[in-house]
Image (tube, rainbow, N blue to C red):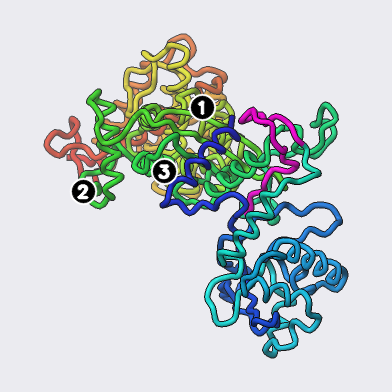
């Protein structure tokens, strides 16, 4: 189904005059040098097409070139008019002569009936042994070290030889000629009897894949083959379908408007019809746009597309009609990650635009948390990675979470357990925003699990729920009060109560909480001498929370993983509530609020 949809997409692209996707038998390649020939076939110069800032990384110019196959094995496989210097110039100490001879035979075969002056210059070039005798001093040395591809140009004229109309027609005739050695069969996509593709076209420029390219369809072991078929003949794809699908895949990879990267997974998306507005909106959604909690002052700085998308999501949430977009536009979403010379398909989803927006809005509601700026899933998932780096996010976790955001299904259980593990190991202390982001993701996992199991009435809310009696949630709230008391009594310390005890309090509260409560009494006694209002406030919160615990067993010996998640959520929400700036017009009893929002004695 993936290849079929890519094939259909390509057929639509080639009909679009505004799209620069190459036609069949043509592709795009990064070219580093333009070799300049005179009419006699002499190489008289070479223009560099890449930018070099002194570092190893170079930017080559991407141009349309004759399509070439993938090189494999030990034989010679020359490319037409765009190749490396080993084939076109013979600059290879080991096999340069053989490679240039093979390239000469290909060009003579393609251009034998072409009378274009550029084609004749190329043929004369391959007839000469002294082709580089007129090169400027130092140019030959640079070409010997040239990386990537080079292409021919004609002296005194712009562009490349392969772009000249007669040369292009000669290449098309050569490529379309019947291959006597072709394997014929019924294409699994079109059903037509046609020559089958031996290899699926490779995609170059995929981060993490081989520089030579990676293939979506391949069979590299005997165990993957059947009925005596070899390589991609097992897929039974016609040469035309394979070429079209490969071209569409390369186009999507090269278009910033049709891709977004999550860790090592590249998400490619396209539509079943021309839909520029809808495609841009999905790109914004995947990139992360905060809908419910952006201040009105900041909305004025947003682009028109973001404002329109925000309005649409608000209309969907309130049940109003949507006129800005076509909600029935169908999107194809393909997640691919590199695997050496192959592309591993992580997921493939087909959803309407309206359904994508509904599920994204549900995701925003699930991760909504007081004091946490809603952000993209990609940013939130960095909380699961070592050092908080995106490249360290497990690809399997990315794929499952992305599919969950798209379809509204439950988040992977691995996400929940990894968040708990990271919190126990680093106490969410590397960045002041880490705790809120982790609590938001943990809440989303619990809320979705409750929804799927039909327990929506006990779902967590985005703000503190003082009536919630789940033991994990209540103990998390109590831990936040203990931490607040310590901070008010002794200020900043090298290792706070959270740094030392949050892991133990969330897993084995019976061993940790009694000791922490005893210390809290000492802290409250110290606070009472300096700020009785704050002391009364903390005592009132502690008593209210203790009343919610089970009378028979105040502190359970252990908490389940689900209760540990509730602990972190309850802790964060209570902590945010304790530090929330109270209204000066209606402060709590026996308390006032200073200019920083802290409680102080009247």
Q: Is residue 144 above or below residue 361?
A: below
Residue plotted at (23% across, 26% down): 321
Crowdedness near tag 1: few (<14), some (14–19) or many (≥20) residues, C-alpha within 10 Å: many
Q: Which residue is mark 1?
A: 411
Q: Which mark is residue 297?
A: 2
- Give the x, y percent position of residue 182: 77, 41
Segment colored magenta: 184-204
Q: Residue furthest bottom?
A: 137
**Quadrant of the rendered image containing residue 545:** top left
For discs 2 and 3, the disc positioned in front in the rendered view: 3
> In this orientation, which residue lies closer to the viewer: 443 or 302?
302
- Between 531 and 372, the one nearer to me in the picture: 372
Q: Secondary structure at mark 1?
A: loop
Disc number lying in front (1 or 3): 3
- The foreground one among 135 and 290 is 135
Q: What residue is rendered at 71% in x and 52% in y?
A: 69
Residues at circles 1 and 3 in contact by the CB criterion of under 8 Å: no
Helix, strand or loop at mark 2 = helix
Pick whichever, 285 or 418, lies toward us: 285
Q: Which residue is mark 3?
A: 283
Image x and y of residue 440, in percent? 42, 33
Q: Along the polypeptide, which appears first: circle 1 or circle 3? A: 3
């Amino acid at each position: 189904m993936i290849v079929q949809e890519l094939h259909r997409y390509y057929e639509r692209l080639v009909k679009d005059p505004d799209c620069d996707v190459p036609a069949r038998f043509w592709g795009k390649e990064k070219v580093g040098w333009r070799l300049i020939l005179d009419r006699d076939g002499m190489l008289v110069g070479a223009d560099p097409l890449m930018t070099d800032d002194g570092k190893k990384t170079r930017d080559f110019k991407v141009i349309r070139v004759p399509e070439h196959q993938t090189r494999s094995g030990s034989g010679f496989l020359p490319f037409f008019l765009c190749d490396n210097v080993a084939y076109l110039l013979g600059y290879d100490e080991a096999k340069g002569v053989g490679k240039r001879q093979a390239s000469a035979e290909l060009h003579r075969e393609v251009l034998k009936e072409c009378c274009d002056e550029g084609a004749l210059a190329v043929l004369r070039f391959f007839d000469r042994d002294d082709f580089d005798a007129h090169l400027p001093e130092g140019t030959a040395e640079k070409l010997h070290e040239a990386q990537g591809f080079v292409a021919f140009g004609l002296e005194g004229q712009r562009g490349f030889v392969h772009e000249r109309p007669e040369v292009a027609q000669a290449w098309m005739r050569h490529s379309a000629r019947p291959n006597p050695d072709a394997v014929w069969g019924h294409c699994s996509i079109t059903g037509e009897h046609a020559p089958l593709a031996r290899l699926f076209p490779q995609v170059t420029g995929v981060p993490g894949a081989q520089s030579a390219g990676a293939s979506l369809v391949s069979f590299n072991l005997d165990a993957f083959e059947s009925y005596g078929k070899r390589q991609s003949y097992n897929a039974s794809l016609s040469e035309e379908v394979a070429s079209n699908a490969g071209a569409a895949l390369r186009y999507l990879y090269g278009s910033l408007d049709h891709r977004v990267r999550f860790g090592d997974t590249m998400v490619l998306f396209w539509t079943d019809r021309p839909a520029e507005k809808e495609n841009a909106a999905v790109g914004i959604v995947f990139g992360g746009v905060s809908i419910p909690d952006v201040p009105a002052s900041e909305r004025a700085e947003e682009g028109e597309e973001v404002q329109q998308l925000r309005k649409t999501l608000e209309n969907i949430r309130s049940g109003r009609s949507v006129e800005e977009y076509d909600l029935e536009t169908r999107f194809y979403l393909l997640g691919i990650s590199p695997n050496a010379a192959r592309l591993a398909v992580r997921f493939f989803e087909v959803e309407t635009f309206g359904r994508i927006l509904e599920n994204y809005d549900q995701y925003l509601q699930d991760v909504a948390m007081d004091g946490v700026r809603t952000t993209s899933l990609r940013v939130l998932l960095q909380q699961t990675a070592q050092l908080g780096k995106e490249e360290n996010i497990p690809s399997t976790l990315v794929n499952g979470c992305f599919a969950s955001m798209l379809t509204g299904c439950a988040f992977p259980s691995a996400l929940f357990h990894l968040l708990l593990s990271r919190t126990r190991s680093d106490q969410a202390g590397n960045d002041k925003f880490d705790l809120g982001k982790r609590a938001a993701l943990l809440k989303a996992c619990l809320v979705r699990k409750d929804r799927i199991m039909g327990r929506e009435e006990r779902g967590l809310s985005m703000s503190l729920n003082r009536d919630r009696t789940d033991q994990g949630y209540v103990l998390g709230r109590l831990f936040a009060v203990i931490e607040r008391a310590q901070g008010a009594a002794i200020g900043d310390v090298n290792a706070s109560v959270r740094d030392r005890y949050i892991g133990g309090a969330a897993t084995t509260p019976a061993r940790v909480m009694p000791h922490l409560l005893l210390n809290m009494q000492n802290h409250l006694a110290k606070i009472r001498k300096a700020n009785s209002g704050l002391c009364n406030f903390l005592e009132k919160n502690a008593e209210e929370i203790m009343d919610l615990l089970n009378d028979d067993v105040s502190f359970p010996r252990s908490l389940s993983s689900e209760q540990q998640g509730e602990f972190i959520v309850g802790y964060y929400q209570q902590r945010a509530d304790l530090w929330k700036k109270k209204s000066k017009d209606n402060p709590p009893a026996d308390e006032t609020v200073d200019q920083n929002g802290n409680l102080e004695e009247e």
